[in-house]
Amino acid sequence: MSKKIVVLNGSPRANGNTSALIAAFTQGAEEAGHSVTSFHLQSMKIGACIGCFGGGKDPKSPCVQKDDMDIIYPAYREADIVVLASPLYYWTVSGQLKCAFDRLFAVAEGEPGYRNPHKESVLIMAAEGSGFEETVFWYDNLMRHLGWTNLGKVLASGVMNPGDIDGKPFLEEARKLGAGLA
């Protein structure tokens, strides 16, 4: 069965190692018959959540702020799988990814008890080092709190400069993860 996949790319680099991982994942997913919509968050105008609890009134545009999240919301609603992709910044996800993800709360505000839509998820990260522990802790607990299902993680270490990932096994790992989605 074909799945709809949304990728939230939190890398500031349009052609960096995170983007290479996303491309490999997307190739595998599309070869398996899934559709992938990717959002490069750095190139979008997305304000931070202002904590107003005023969202959820308009399903098409659930947040009171009107910005490029209105492009993401419909794809997010329809998605079966949400891919969180980011370089490792200070041992966690980038601000771009965290900011956009926080704004997804406006969708939950339209549901009783702030119920989030059930999704499956993937975590894709690239880093100079290998200190993914804080992010993995955050991600695993996020899955538990949201009631989402983790489908896998690709944690690419030792890749700082654009192109460092070329020839490394992480790209094939990402492609196989995308290709193996059921």
Image (spheres, rainbow, N blue to C red):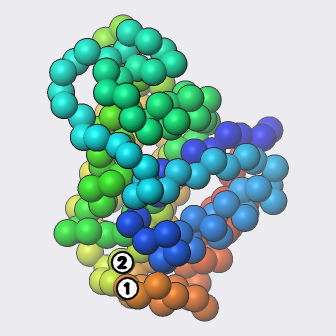
How many other residues sit within 10 Å of disc 2, few (<14), some (14-19) or many (≥20)?
many
Residue 31 appearing in the image:
yes
* Residue at screen point 50% across, 37% down: 72
Residue pointed to by mark 1:
160
Q: Amino acid at mark 1?
A: Met
Q: Relative to 164, say whether 69 is above or below.
A: above
Count of numbered badges drawn on the protein:
2
Residue pointed to by mark 2:
127
User: Quadrant of residue 23 in the image?
Assistant: bottom right
Query: Residue 124 versus residue 163: which sits nearer the camera?
Result: 163
Can you tell which mark lies on residue 35?
A: none
Q: Is residue 88 left or right of residue 157?
A: left
User: Quadrant of residue 113 in the image?
Assistant: top left
Q: Which of the two discs, 2 and 1, sits closer to the camera? A: 1
Residue 141 appearing in the image:
no
SS at badge 1:
loop
How many other residues sit within 10 Å of disc 1, few (<14), some (14-19) or many (≥20)?
some
**Quadrant of the snapshot with the N terminus:** top right
CB under 8 Å between callouts 2 and 1?
yes
